[in-house]
Amino acid sequence: MVFIKFNKLWLILILIATIFSVLYLYYTLFPGNISHEVYKYFSPSEISKAQKYHKVNRLIYITSFLTKVAFLLWLVFGNNAIKLSYYTEKLASGKYYVNVFLYFIALWVILRLISLPFSLLSHSVQVE
């Protein structure tokens, strides 16, 4: 029975993350109107460049986020987290706290490697 509640909790968290991701994507692709007061300080070409720049960076960010979420779902629900735990346990020689430390370091490194291409891409974005 606890397992069923655990799965419902995961389902709720995944649905919340999906809803917020869809909202973020919607407002990135279809931004609202720009206030007329902005045109007092910036030219229309500067505003257009800023919109393009931020749109591309937001799309890169949401793609990076969804890629990491997909990886974590694959890790957790595909029993690969257990395999990773087994490898870190062998490496830690059965020491619990070392195992936990190595597990989270390995997870952190994997997530950083997944986000690396997106980070490099976002730093190379230029608007013409």
Image: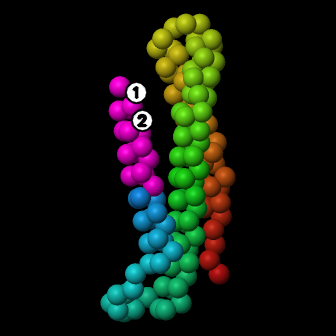
Which residue is identified by label 2? 7
| Most foreground residue, 60 or 9 | 9
Mark 2 surroundings within 10 Å by alpha-carbon count, few (fewer than 14), some (14 through 19), many (20 or more): few
Q: Please name the residue shown 48% across and 85% down the image.
A: 47
Mark 1: few/some/many CA within 10 Å (<14, 14-19, 20+): few
Q: Is residue 2 magenta?
A: yes
Residue at point 53% right, 59% down? 62
Q: Residue at left 44%, top 78%?
A: 31
Among the 4 quarters of the image, the one containing residue 89 = top right
Which of the numbered marks, if any, corresponds to residue 71?
none
Q: Nearer the viewer, residue 113 or 12?
A: 12
Residue furthest out toward the front: 1
Q: Which residues are magenta?
A: 1-18
When the figure is inspected, residue 65 is found, relative to residue 84, above or below; the finding is: below
**Residue 34 image point, x, y percent:** 39, 86
Left or right: where does residue 32 sit relative to residue 116? left
Q: Is residue 61 above or below residue 79?
A: below
Q: Which residue is under mark 1?
A: 3
Q: Do tag 1 and tag 2 residues touch (Cβ < 8 Å)? A: yes
The reply to whether residue 128 is visible in this rendering is yes
Q: Is residue 12 left or right of residue 112?
A: left
Q: Quadrant of the C terminus?
A: bottom right
Which amino acid type is marked by label 1? Phe
